[in-house]
Image (cartoon, rainbow, N blue to C red):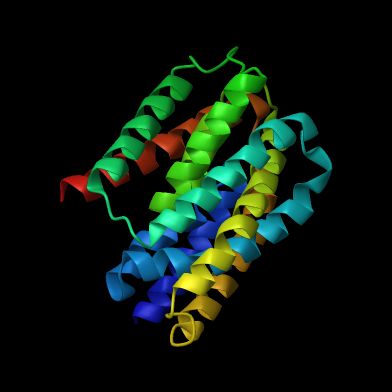
Amino acid sequence: MFEALLTVVAFLAGGIASVAGFGIGAILTPVFALAVGTKAAVAVVSLPHLAGTLVRFWLVRGHVDRTVLIHFGLVSAAGAFAGAMLHGHASNPLLAALLSALLIATGVAGMAGRMEGRHFGRTGAWVAGVVSGLLGGLVGNQGGIRSAALLGFKLKRDAFLATTTAVGLIVDAARIPLYISNDSHFERLWLPALLMTAGVLAGTLLGARLLRRIPEAAFRRIVSGVVLALGLFLAFRVAS
């Protein structure tokens, strides 16, 4: 029953990620952690996350903003690499609380329209990239904080989704080898990893169809709403 539930959740996570640009790790990790623990869940979920991100990138690859990708994505990957190195040695509720507060603040500001017209310069992009990558590598929810940071750039819907997806691929390339080398759970958890991957891929393809129906003007507020929901969920987990 749990494996069936996991597959359904993976399907929903893939669909949400196709629309918002993130959500696979944020949704799947806490559910899978109920059975295997947080550290193992973060590591194993990185595999379906990579599969879904690859498919999503292939679908939107022509819209990547290369300037943002270079100035934000590369330093984000460096931050994620550092966070992934520390992941096996750190379990800090204070860090999760800080991340939830950042997500809630960004989500509220985005839904209120206060993120519109904001734009990071090159230095701001580097800082946002490092911080989002580091926090993501540590906590395992890099997509939410990355998308929150990317809301500070003047990106249209397709460029936003393509760029955050491309950054996600870079981050996965930086962190997954560390997870594999530092985690011994992959061999015994291959079946749930396979089921999650299948669910994510199916949800990703369906979500890509739904994305075309979302008006450009509503897209940023939808992303902000998902960021806010993730922040509230993390806050609930920290409080409990």
**Rendered location of residue 6, percent (x, y):** 42, 72
Task: Name which residue lies at 46% across and 67% down.
Answer: 43
Let me know if residue 220 appears in the view.
no
Q: Residue furthest right?
A: 62
203 or 190, which is in the foreground?
Answer: 190
Q: Residue furthest bottom?
A: 188
The reply, left or right, for residue 210 in relation to residue 178 is right
**Rendered location of residue 110, percent (x, y):** 47, 23
Let me know if residue 24 appears in the view.
yes
Task: Name which residue lies at 49% across and 47% down.
Answer: 142
In the depicted structure, whether residue 187 falls above or below residue 71: below
The reply, left or right, for residue 66 in relation to residue 114 is right
Residue 202 appears in which quarter of the rendering?
Answer: bottom right
In the depicted structure, whether residue 139 falls above or below residue 46: above
Task: Name which residue lies at 42% across and 63% down.
Answer: 42
Residue 160 appears in which quarter of the rendering?
Answer: top right
**Rendered location of residue 33, percent (x, y):** 33, 67
**Rendered location of residue 81, percent (x, y):** 54, 52
The reply, left or right, for residue 91 in relation to residue 15 is left
Q: Quadrant of the image for the N terminus?
A: bottom left
In the depicted structure, whether residue 92 falls above or below residue 65: below
Tally of numbered discs: 0
The reply, left or right, for residue 66 in relation to residue 102 is right
